């Protein structure tokens, strides 16, 4: 396919998969249960944090986290007592356990109390065309609280070569507009043009098949390469093609 044909193909696939009925099998359904901005972004961040592996398992575990927070994520993050936090100690999703969950609640509390939340920090450190450095900077503030080193692996660090798939997915949820009923468009201080594609095994495989990506590893360098290719197709909203790449990989086994 030439560039014109490729863009037309991916635009059509984006329309096919960027639909509200996509929510029924996707972890993004968890933050869609809430109305308040702070509840949505906290539910989205914690859901994205555990978003690896089987999607039904992710959804079950994310629902369990919401139950542990009494279906009020912001109130729980900002005001849960130590006794209430201890009740979460038995939580586990793969390698993310109760200690990690409590650490992440406290990390979020630190950001909301001392920095006004996540959006102001990401905005402060954002580059005009990139949020990868901002992820690393926000991560640094997040772990200013006392914590065990084991919890750090659950907040990816692009400066160490990570593709930061889950963080980039969370940022897509927060920044891309709500007009299709999937993403939220909550963070109006940032633009879709600054986003990076949430690169995983499915989107990576399809991107390589379509010659959008040549690098074999799914790492930070691959994210930068894929971003460059997608921005040539749509500079204003390159990450809309995440729907096409993911859908082709998961639902069509595109070769």
Image (cartoon, helix red, strand yellow):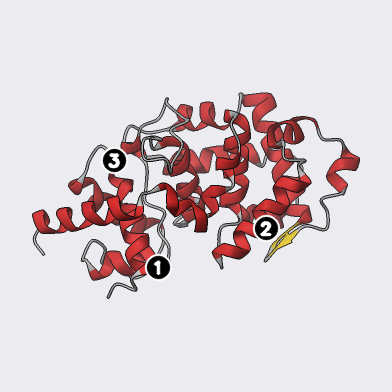
Q: Residue 182, image x and y in percent?
A: 43, 43
Examine the rendering and report whether any part of residue 31 can be seen.
yes
The label on residue 237 is 3
Judged from the image, the secondary structure of the residue bearing numbered disc 3 is loop
Judged from the image, the secondary structure of the residue bearing numbered disc 1 is helix
Foreground: disc 2 or disc 3: 2
Above or below, 133 against 203 in this view is above
Disc with the residue nearer the chain's start (1 vs 3): 3
Which residue corresponds to the image point at 31% horizontal and 57% vertical from the top-left?
244
Q: Is residue 252 left or right of residue 110?
A: left
According to the image, label 1 marks what residue?
A: 250
Q: Pick the quarter of the image with the N terminus.
A: bottom left
Q: Nearer the viewer, residue 117 or 14?
A: 14
- The reply to whether callout 1 and callout 3 are in contact (CB within 8 Å) is no
Q: Residue 77, image x and y in percent?
A: 73, 35
Judged from the image, the secondary structure of the residue bearing numbered disc 2 is helix
Q: Residue 20, image x and y in percent?
A: 43, 47
Examine the rendering and report whether any part of residue 215 can be seen.
no
Q: Is residue 93 left or right of residue 1?
A: right
- The reply to whether callout 1 and callout 2 are in contact (CB within 8 Å) is no
- The reply to whether callout 2 and callout 3 are in contact (CB within 8 Å) is no
Which residue corresponds to the image point at 56% horizontal and 32% vertical from the top-left?
118
Packing grade of label 3 (10 A; few <14, some 14-19, many >=20) is some
Q: Quadrant of residue 254?
A: bottom left
Packing grade of label 1 (10 A; few <14, some 14-19, many >=20) is few
Q: Pick the quarter of the image with the C terminus.
A: bottom left
Disc with the residue nearer the chain's start (1 vs 2): 2
Packing grade of label 2 (10 A; few <14, some 14-19, many >=20) is many
The label on residue 61 is 2
């Amino acid at each position: 396919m030439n560039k014109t044909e490729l863009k037309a193909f991916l635009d059509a696939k984006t329309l096919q998969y960027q639909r509200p009925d996509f929510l029924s099998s996707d972890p993004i359904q968890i933050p869609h249960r809430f109305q308040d901005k702070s509840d949505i972004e906290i539910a989205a961040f914690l859901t994205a944090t555990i978003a690896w592996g089987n999607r039904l398992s992710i959804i079950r575990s994310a629902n369990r986290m919401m139950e542990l927070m009494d279906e009020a994520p912001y109130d729980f993050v900002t005001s849960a007592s130590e006794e209430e936090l201890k009740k979460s100690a038995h939580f586990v999703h793969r390698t993310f356990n109760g200690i990690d969950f409590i650490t992440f609640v406290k990390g979020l509390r630190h950001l909301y109390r001392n920095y006004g939340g996540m959006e102001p920090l990401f905005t402060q450190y954002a580059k005009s065309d990139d949020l990868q450095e901002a992820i690393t900077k926000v991560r640094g503030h997040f772990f200013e609280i006392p914590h065990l080193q084991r919890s750090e692996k659950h907040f990816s660090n692009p400066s160490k070569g990570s593709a930061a798939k889950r963080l980039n997915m969370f940022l897509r949820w927060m920044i891309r507009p709500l007009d299709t009923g999937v993403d939220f468009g909550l963070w109006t201080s940032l633009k879709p043009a600054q986003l990076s594609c949430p690169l995983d095994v499915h989107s990576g495989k399809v991107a390589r098949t379509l010659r959008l990506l040549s690098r074999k590893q799914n790492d930070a360098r691959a994210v930068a390469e894929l971003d460059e290719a997608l921005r040539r197709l749509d500079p204003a909203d390159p990450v809309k093609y995440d729907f096409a790449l993911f859908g082709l990989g998961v639902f069509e086994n595109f070769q």
